[in-house]
Amino acid sequence: MQRPNKGKTPRRPGHKKAANVDKDPVGVYCRIRPLGAEDVECCVEMISSSTIQLHAPDGLKANRNGEYKETQYSFKKVFGINTTQMELFEDVAKPLIEDLIHCKNGLLFTYGVTGSGKTFTMTGSPGEGGLLPRSLDMLFNSIGPFQAKRFVFKPDDKNGMEIQGQVDALLERQKRESQQTIPKTPSSRQKADPELADMIKSEEAYKSENVDEDCCYSVFVSYIEIYNNYIYDLLEDAPFDPIRPKAPQSKILREDQNHNMYVAGCTEVEVKSTEEAFEVFWKGQKKRRIANTELNRESSRSHSVFTVKLAQAPLDADGDHILQDKHQVNVSQLCLVDLAGSERTSRTRAEGSRLREAGNINQSLMTLRTCMEVLRENQMCGTNKMVPYRDSKVTHLFKNYFDGEGKVRMIVCVNPKADDYDETMLVMRFAEMTQEVEVARPVDRPICALAAGRRHRNRVYKDELSPRMDERGAPGNAVDDAALLDQLIESLPTLPRCELVDPADDQTLPRLMEVLERRHRVRQMMTEQFNKTASTLKSMLQQFDSQINSKETFLHDQRSKLSEKEKVISSQKSEMERLEKKSKTLEYKIDILQKTTNMYEQDKRSLQQELETREQRLHRELTEKKRMEQRMQGMVTDTKLKWEKECERRVNAKQLEMQNKLWVKDEKLKQLKAIVTESSSGCGSGFPSERPEKPERPSRERDHKRSASPSPLQTAPPVHPTHRRSHSAGGEKWVDHKPASNLDLDTVMQPIIPNAIKVSTPNEKALSKCQKYVLRHQELASDGEIETKLIKGNVFKTRGGGQAVQFTDIETLKQECATASSRKRRSGSGEQAAHMEDIENRAPVPSTSSNVGYQKRRKP
């Protein structure tokens, strides 16, 4: 049974970058810290406003050439030891605040070794405020009159902003005010927070002039720290349990719909003044992890990120209220980062948790360097290597600044003391490399379609309307009420004179009572009329209320229908967008398939051409191979015929040579037989001495006859009656058949062969006391040469007590003359080859005759 294929999660399409985007390099500045009182030697020298030079201290080893190395590094601007915080802010942070007001993001971070003044540059001290408080002061000085009421802008927890109505904002404010707790009285032991007035002087305040007055602004701040590669919220109000305190919870990074990274669940506080923002910052600063090390009394053990987020939305056409459109809200942010300093544990002598903190700090800074190196390589070499942003939370959080758009600036803080020379050298190299990284330039936000100057016109209108309202206000109403009262009084009967002169006067009182009764009846009539009018008016109001309710019900129904229509429209729009995306995706796939098809067709054509070329080449090779085979067959046939003739010639020559050798051996055997026969007959055996006939020399005409006749070796020669010849592997043996007579071979052969020589063997024990005999025989050949034949043999004792002779070798010594040698040169090739094979060495030529020599031949 096959398992069903599990569907894969579709990959989210990445953020498409514009093809032609203007880019700016990362702005890198350098600030030199003044030397301490205990530091004497300085290794950093400021050459110009943009260049510094590093001198190797006296204790550092020299280079290979024996001289100290001096290196120079250039920056966008170098700030010396006498630079004030205000000058640094004006050149570095002020342009970032102006970009923030104009909806452009920015990133500013300090970098350097531990104890180089990074925290002082960012935060400052009383009387010398750093970049952070001065940035907040300039921001609120610029947008202060144009800020929206609190809770009009509300974060949506997805790195975006929502707009609330005036009523919802009022309810939210009342709710927050009711939830506020009574602030605790600060303890006298606790150090008081520095006030902003102590950080920045009034004459040092900055303000941006290019602020859009037709927008409303709100500022939100957040403060986090990255400790041991974990993110913690420094503004989170966690309940404190003194019995069982809980560790703060770390936060995670997420990506919003615009592919920007943000910290999920981070506290964002809305602030309305510089003092309030600085108070919130100092609240988080108290929670930041700071420790005492050997190199710095207050060393930052984490990277801190203070984010200023500015939300702005345009006013409506009347210029009185904010435009209730979420798509018109623009959010920009500025991140002020104080990186922890790199340090060497051999100098800080860190142990335990401090050692772990130092390792994580150095690892995150190393990841930052690696990301910068890969970015520079991708931009300069055109490669597309993956930048390892995710290896550290610091680089992952600021990924959108380097891959997206925004302005990035870095302040390199340098401690010029000689002890930090090695670390300062590494910082300088990183800064020099960072300047070559380019970041996309932020683009301007689209301008609202409404007319400019709406807020100003609304203010002028209100200024003109208020005097007129004052003129027609409370005094006019009082005059109208007095005239109406006078008219009512005039409509009543006039009162008579009420003076009583006489106690017996009975006319004045009755007359007064009559007038008062008439007035009372008039008043009752007026009261009844007023009640009737009031009831009529009340009924009319009720009718109006019922009509208004019906109208509201109708409006509610219409709004519900409209909302349903809007939902349908939105669903249709989303469906249309989905279909458009799908169609674009399909078009993209079609384009890819078309390109792939074209590529395959080109490959097919090229392969076909290559195949045809190879077929033609193969055909040519086959034709050449056949031609070569035919040629080789002809050559083989010719060579075969040639070698067959040569072999036949050589075989014939060899046969002739072997026949000559056999003839010579036969001659030798016959001569030996004749000698033995003569010797035996001479000793009284009674046999007549007969001279053997000289055998004929073999020739080419009798080759076939001799080959057909039996070999001389196969035909047994006649032997002496007392001896017979036997063949063995070593030669021929003559065996004595009369052991009883004890015939001594020496006594027999010595008188017969006067030239016989007895030679004793050098190893007689090994040869069983055998003796060697040499028979010398001289004769004159037919060609006039004198031949001396030495027949060598061994004598062995037989088993019956006799002796046996085994002939082992025959040597022929010839003394030839010039005429004989010339005749021999004209002999056949077969005889000449045999002659050359038999010759082993040539004897030296005697001094009596230069034409006579000796040759030594050995016959097997």
Image (cartoon, rainbow, N blue to C red):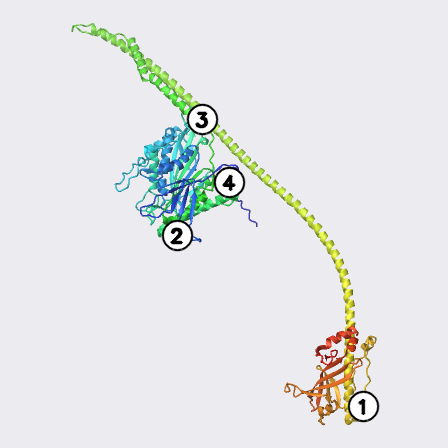
| Distance in Å between CA atoms under marks 3 and 2 | 84 Å
For residue 14, which numbered disc appears in the image? 4
> Where 784 falls versus 330 (above or below)?
below
**Can you say which quadrant of the picture contains the C terminus?**
bottom right
Q: Which residue is mark 3?
A: 556
> Where 25 falls versus 560 (above or below)?
below
**Could you tell which of marks 3 and 2 lies nearer the N-terminus?**
2
Q: Residue 15 versus residue 378: which sits nearer the camera? A: 378
Q: CB of mark 1 within 8 Å of CB of mark 4?
A: no
Q: Dot 1 surroundings within 10 Å: few (below 14), some, or many (20 or more)?
A: some
Q: CB of mark 4 within 8 Å of CB of mark 3?
A: no
Q: Which residue is mark 2?
A: 60
Judged by depth in the image, the label closer to the viewer, 1 or 4, is 1
| Distance in Å between CA atoms under marks 4 and 2 | 50 Å
**Could you tell which of marks 1 and 4 lies nearer the N-terminus?**
4
Judged by depth in the image, the label closer to the viewer, 3 or 2, is 2
Residue plotted at (57% across, 36% down): 583
Under mark 1, the amino acid is Ser
Q: Dot 3 surroundings within 10 Å: few (below 14), some, or many (20 or more)?
A: few
> Where 334 falls versus 36 (above or below)?
above
Check disc 2 and report its element: helix, strand or loop: loop
Q: Position of residue 818 (x, y in %)?
A: 77, 77
Q: Position of residue 745 (x, y in %)?
A: 71, 90
Q: Dot 4 surroundings within 10 Å: few (below 14), some, or many (20 or more)?
A: few
Residue 270 quadrant? top left
Q: Which residue is mark 1?
A: 689
Q: CB of mark 3 within 8 Å of CB of mark 1?
A: no
| Distance in Å between CA atoms under marks 1 and 2 | 123 Å
Judged by depth in the image, the label closer to the viewer, 3 or 1, is 1
Q: From where the camera sits, is residue 339 visible?
A: no
Under mark 4, the amino acid is Gly
| Distance in Å between CA atoms under marks 4 and 3 | 43 Å
